Image (spheres, coloured by chain):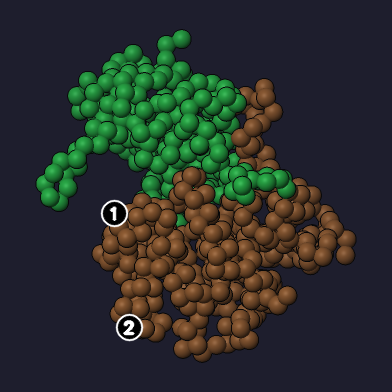
């Protein structure tokens, strides 16, 4: 099956105030299949938000795409002209951000904010515009779609605001939605609700999604494949059930071990310590040569310090970047 | 043993005035009672809007409850005047969800750490330096970062700093209002372990407010489940998890996203 989006060897770096280059993504490659939900899992500093922004060339001023390609509908988005990009952003590929209260205009009714997206991509006349806006709201809100469309953002709950953002994202009927931590500021029950909305949209509209999160549990039962990012590199990529159920990379395994389980073995009181990954994933912890996870890895070997591991195929669909798995 | 804190029938009513002038009353706390023994952790869990943060503010003497009493070390602090409450506040410290917005972005680590001592007064600069250093050490940070700004620290380091600041004036009770929710999973585990270590070495008492039942069960001795301003279920952490009685608890348990190992999840049904 042909992919809808193909990312090849993407390198992005930021310029610090002193002028030094800080690499954020170092050779990311993956493809997105039609109708697929790809979960991108990464902690702070992994480059996950940089990835979302780089795909649509929305990096901040000090961010540079060093090399790579993003193929979409026969075009390389990284080479596309600004007007071509404007036709794609929000219409063919849309982006949903983390903080719905920042992404919405505070003094504009929800319906108007969706209408503007539609109008920006060709104006089909007022009544058609209203009709489509109405449709989109009905798509993401089961109840009270009309009341919510007339409301201002401050009159809405966090979950409702996030749904308005989703309404904006799907208004033009895109084939890909990139969501960067769309549920991070919501409580768990609402998080699950929003995930439910995404599932429904995928089924009804056949959307392909890149769902970026730091919470592995959200991806379980939702994503088709999971890509684990560490230090701007692909640590592991495979079917969700495999990566979440039997992770191969030492980082993925340590990460999952550090999450407390709801039902621990009976008898364990609150005195048991959680297994942790020592250190943190800030820029300064990445070595100049070798595997980026080496300083924090409990299974490191000599070779890990000498050069970077390449991607190893564990099966047709499961790849991992670690020397533990022989080439 | 005498409890460190006992809340009795706490009531907090907010009045909201709508643009048309109509008054709307909101009962944020509706008869909340609980006790915390010294050196233990009580977790208060609930969905957003259940009143758990209002509870934190009332306990920390930052809001006055409409009715009810809060007995802290045997004295009802609700009846205290402003002068007396100022004596109580340093003993009850709050840690918030987002360390980035609870730390002054223009102050360096040293200034942030010593502000509580500054307000306390009567500390020589030598003593401040020494206490700032030792509280950093307690939370596992190196004193090399003393001159850094919050923006130059990672999320985990910032939350450690917020905890260090709360500890500089040696409080008896630490209220953690969603203090782990904004952190990455691996950092959450580090901070959770730190909190347990501090409880062991300093005998700290925690009021841990969260919507994450799994973390609550991991850290707390007892759990109180809140819904619409009331505690609907309360008991030993283990019992609450194994035999949830109230519908809210069951809903919260179901909402805990978990990694299912290949098995079906609630979502797929």
Label 2 and label 1 in one chain: yes
CA gap, disc 2 to disc 1? 29 Å
Q: Is residue A318 left or right of residue B235?
A: right
Tell me where residue A280 appears, x and y as whole percent: 61, 51
User: Residue A51, labelled with which disc?
Assistant: none
Q: Which chain is brown?
A: A
Figure quadrant of residue A302: bottom right
Q: Which residue is mark 2?
A: A125
Work out whether B237 lies above or below A77.
above
Which SS class for mark 2? loop
Residue B91 percent location from the top left of the image: 36, 27
Q: Nearer the viewer, residue A58 or A190?
A: A190
**What is the chain letter for disc 2?**
A
User: What's the colour of chain B in the image?
Assistant: green
Residue B216 horizontal/vertical position (percent): 53, 33
Task: Give the class, few, some or many, for how many residues have Cα within 10 Å of label 2's Cα (few <14, many ≥20).
Answer: few
- Residue A99 or residue B166, whichever sits in front: A99
Q: Residue furthest top?
A: B1
């Amino acid at each position: 099956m042909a992919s809808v989006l193909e990312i090849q060897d993407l390198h992005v770096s930021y310029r610090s105030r002193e002028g030094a280059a800080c690499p954020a993504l170092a050779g990311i490659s993956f493809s997105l299949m039609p109708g697929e939900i790809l979960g991108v899992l990464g902690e702070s500093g992994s480059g996950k938000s940089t990835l979302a922004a780089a795909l649509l060339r929305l990096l901040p001023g000090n961010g540079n795409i060093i090399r790579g390609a993003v193929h979409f509908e026969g075009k390389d988005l990284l080479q596309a002209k600004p007007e071509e990009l404007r036709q794609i952003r929000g219409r063919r590929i849309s982006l949903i951000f983390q903080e719905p209260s920042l992404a919405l205009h505070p003094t504009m009714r929800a319906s108007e904010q969706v209408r503007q997206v539609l109008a920006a991509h060709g104006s089909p006349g007022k009544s058609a515009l209203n009709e489509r806006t109405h449709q989109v709201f009905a798509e993401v809100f089961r109840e009270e779609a009309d009341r919510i469309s007339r409301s201002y953002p401050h009159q809405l709950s966090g979950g409702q605001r996030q749904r308005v953002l989703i309404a904006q994202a799907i208004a033009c009927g895109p084939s890909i939605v990139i969501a960067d931590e769309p549920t991070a500021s919501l409580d768990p029950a609402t998080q699950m609700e929003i995930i439910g909305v995404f599932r429904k949209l995928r089924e009804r509209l056949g959307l392909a999604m890149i769902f970026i999160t730091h919470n592995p549990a959200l991806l379980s039962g939702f994503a088709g494949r999971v890509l684990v990012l560490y230090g701007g590199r692909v640590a592991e990529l495979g079917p969700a059930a495999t990566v979440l159920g039997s992770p191969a990379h030492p980082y993925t395994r340590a990460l999952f071990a550090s999450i407390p389980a709801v039902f621990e073995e009976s008898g364990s009181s609150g005195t048991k310590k959680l297994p942790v990954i020592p250190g943190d994933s800030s820029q300064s912890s990445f070595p100049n040569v070798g595997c980026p996870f080496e300083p924090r890895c409990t299974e490191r070997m000599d070779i890990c310090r000498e050069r970077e591991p390449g991607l190893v195929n564990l099966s047709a669909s499961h790849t991992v970047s670690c020397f533990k798995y022989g080439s | 043993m005498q409890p460190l804190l006992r809340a009795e029938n706490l009531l907090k009513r907010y009045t909201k005035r709508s643009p048309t002038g109509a008054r709307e009353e909101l009962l944020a706390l509706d008869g909340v009672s609980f006790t915390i023994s010294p050196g233990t952790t009580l977790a208060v869990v609930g969905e957003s809007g259940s009143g758990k943060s209002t509870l934190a503010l009332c306990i920390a003497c930052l809001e006055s409850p409409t009715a009810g009493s809060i007995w802290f070390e045997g004295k009802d602090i609700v009846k205290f005047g402003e002068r007396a409450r100022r004596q109580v506040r340093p003993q009850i410290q709050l840690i918030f969800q987002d360390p980035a917005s609870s730390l002054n972005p223009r102050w360096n680590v040293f200034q942030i750490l010593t502000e509580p001592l500054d307000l306390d007064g009567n500390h020589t600069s030598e003593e401040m330096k020494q206490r700032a250093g030792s509280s950093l050490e307690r939370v596992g940070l190196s004193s090399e970062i003393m001159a850094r700004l919050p923006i130059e620290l990672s999320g985990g380091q910032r939350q450690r700093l917020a905890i260090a600041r709360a500890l500089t004036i040696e409080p008896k009770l630490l209220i953690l209002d969603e203090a782990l929710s904004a952190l990455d999973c691996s950092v959450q585990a580090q901070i959770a372990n730190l909190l347990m270590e501090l409880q062991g070495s300093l005998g700290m008492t925690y009021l841990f407010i969260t919507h994450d039942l799994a973390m609550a069960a991991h850290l707390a001795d007892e759990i109180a489940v809140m819904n619409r301003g009331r505690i609907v279920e309360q008991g030993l952490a283990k019992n609450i998890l194994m035999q949830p009685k109230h519908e809210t608890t069951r809903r919260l348990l179901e909402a805990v996203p978990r990694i299912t190992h290949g098995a079906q999840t609630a979502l797929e049904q």
